[in-house]
Image (cartoon, grey):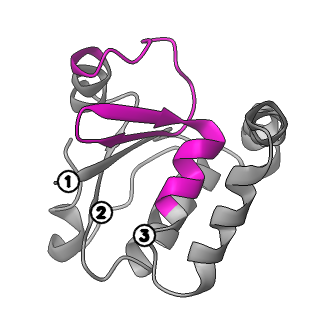
Amino acid sequence: MAKIILFDGICNFCNDSVQFVIKRDPASLFVFASLQGEKGKELLRKNLVPLEVDSLVLIEGDRYYLKSTAALRICRNLRGGWKLLQIFMFVPKPFRDGVYDFLAKNRYRWFGKKESCELPSLNIKKRFLD
């Protein structure tokens, strides 16, 4: 079953996070689509995710996860010590999402926006749905 990560395609931090996941996902469990792209919008509609969502979305089978829950579920599938971050699932969701929202609110100011897209290698390009 494919695990689909929907991300903000113009956010530098979000794009760097996708590259981070790719490097730590040698089994290619994850595929990616930007929230702004047609495929991303189609996946939001198909999975009944509110279209105004402006956060990380993880789609696993017929379920979706948002914000900190999505990030932590992604980490549990990565190579290395990232699995240990699952301990934060015990932190109450409102607190976790509050930290996530603070980062998300400032992401453009702190990390900037992409003016153009990088051209990935063919091996990486096949992991993107748009």
Q: Quadrant of residue 34?
A: top left
Q: Is residue 54 magenta?
A: yes
Label 2: few (<14), some or many (≥20) within 10 Å? few
Residue located 20% across and 63% down the image: 125
Q: CA distance from mark 1 to mark 3?
A: 12 Å
> At label 2, which amino acid type do we have?
Leu
**C-alpha span from label 3 to label 2:** 26 Å
Could you tell me which residue is drawn at 81 percent across and 37 percent down? Answer: 106
Q: Please say if 36 is above or below 95.
A: above
- Quarter of the image with the N terminus in it: bottom left
Q: Residue furthest front?
A: 90
Q: Which residue is mark 2?
A: 119
Q: Earlier in the sequence, mark 1 or mark 2?
A: 1
Report if residue 26 lies within the magenta region. Answer: no
Residue 28's disc number: none
Judged from the image, the secondary structure of the residue bearing numbered disc 3 is loop
Quadrant position of residue 113: top right
Q: Earlier in the sequence, mark 3 or mark 2?
A: 3
Looking at the picture, how far across and down is residue 114, in whole percent? 55, 46
Mark 1 and mark 3 residues within 8 Å of each other at the beta carbon: no
Where is residue 130? Give x, y as percent: 21, 41
Residue at numbered disc 3: 77
Question: x, y percentage for residue 25?
Answer: 36, 76
